[in-house]
Image (cartoon, rainbow, N blue to C red):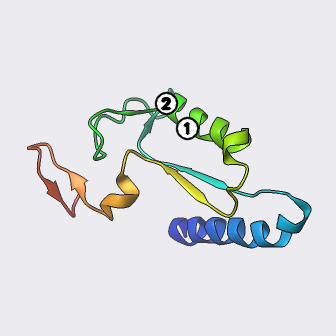
Amino acid sequence: MYAALKAALTNLTKSLAVELGDRNIRVNCVAPDVISTPGVGDMGRRAPLDREGLADDVAAAVAFLVGGWSGFVTGATLHVDGGMHAAGGWFLQSDGHWDLRE
């Protein structure tokens, strides 16, 4: 169900961007992953980038999307995940190598 809802949100973003573009309304999606927050605690380094993700990283992505520099960006999903989306299911293991199992 979780994966289906994520796909639905991504596709809804694209559909709304197409439908509302002629009114100059931009629609984008932010997809955070492995972000340390007070609610979940320290996520540690699990992503390809050599540091943990922070709430400020997500806030900066949102600030970019609402600011003038993203004026021609619509229908996009911005993955704030330190490279997890690019890793395609590979996870950093405790011994430092990457494997398909978490």
Disc 2 marks a residue whose amino acid type is: Thr
Give the residue pinned by disc 1. 58
The residue nearer to you, when weighing 3 against 33, is 33
Name the residue at 58% across, 59% down.
Answer: 77
Q: Locate residue 63, reporting x and y percent.
A: 66, 35
Answer few, some or many: residues within 10 Å of disc 1's Cα (few below 14, many 20 plus, some between 14 and 19): many
Disc 1 marks a residue whose amino acid type is: Val
Give the residue pinned by disc 2. 37
- Res. 39 visible in picture: no
Name the residue at 43% across, 47% down.
Answer: 81
Does residue 56 sit above or below 19 in this rendering?
A: above
Which label number is shown at residue 7? Answer: none
Of helix, strand and loop, which one carries label 1?
helix
- Res. 16 visible in picture: yes
Q: Locate residue 72, reporting x and y percent.
A: 71, 55
Answer with left or right where residue 90 lies relative to residue 38: left
Q: Locate residue 82, reporting x and y percent.
A: 38, 45
Answer with left or right where residue 54 lies relative to residue 18: left
